[in-house]
Image (cartoon, helix red, strand yellow):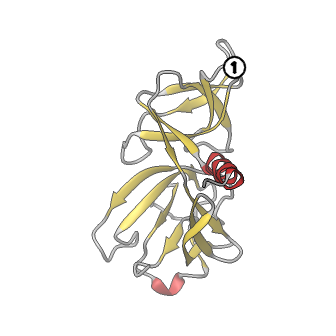
Amino acid sequence: RPNPAAIAREAALVARYTNVLVRVHRTLPALARPQPGAAQVGVVPAGSKYYGLPIVAWVEDFSADGRWGLVELPYSWPRREGWIRIGSLHRRTTRIRVDVDLSEHMVTVTKLGRVLFRAPGATGRSSSPTPVGDYFVTDRVPFSAGGSLGSYAFGISGIQPRLPAGWSGGNQLAIHGTNQPSSIGTSASAGCIRVSEST
């Protein structure tokens, strides 16, 4: 027989770890409050910073009427959030998240709070530390093996405000592979998270 307590616990777990994503089909103004006429604090672009891929933004909160969603403004510094109209936007959900412990140089992937994968990673060096915060994935880009980004990169919605002198690789943060496996587990990058190609 179904256990009501177990069912309730599972439902609470699903609700806690289910995140709503919205597909942004055109650049949207982001407002300070969820109401027409509120001050504009920025925009959520329709395309990602360097690859122009469609933005699928993470909705962190909803207005009481469900017509507005609070999202992080991609590629902005200082980091800030704003309210966008979401009533007509396509929605989907995810129960997967990636956490990076900067002090331990550890990358953990979970689903519904349960660990799926854990591996060491490289983080930003002291002169260009990885900016802390919550981000969402904006790009999924394959590359030819052997390059500095490895064979795959997940671009995220954050940027690095403290780029190394002479850096020419752009300021978007990402989780990606590397052709410097010895850097894994250390503070060695310009701010991105590097993971081993073998994991």
The one nearer the camera, 37 or 78, is 37
Quadrant for the N terminus in the image: bottom right
Instruction: Give the structural element (helix, strand or loop) at label 1.
Output: loop
Apparent side of residue 83 relative to residue 176 in the rendered image (left or right): right
Q: What kind of residue is marked 1?
A: Ala
Quadrant for the C terminus in the image: bottom left
Give me the residue at 61% from left, 24% from top. 68
Label 1 CA crowd tier, 10 Å (few <14, some 14–19, many 20+): some
**Residue situated furthest left in the rendering:** 144
Give me the residue at 32% from left, 77% from top. 146
The location of residue 185, given as percent across then percent down, is 59, 82
Question: Can you say whether 81 is above or below 180 in the image?
Answer: above
Give me the residue at 30% from left, 74% from top. 145
Reading the image, the residue beneath label 1 is 39
Question: Can you say whether 51 is above or below 160 in the image?
Answer: above
Give me the residue at 69% from left, 44% from top. 78
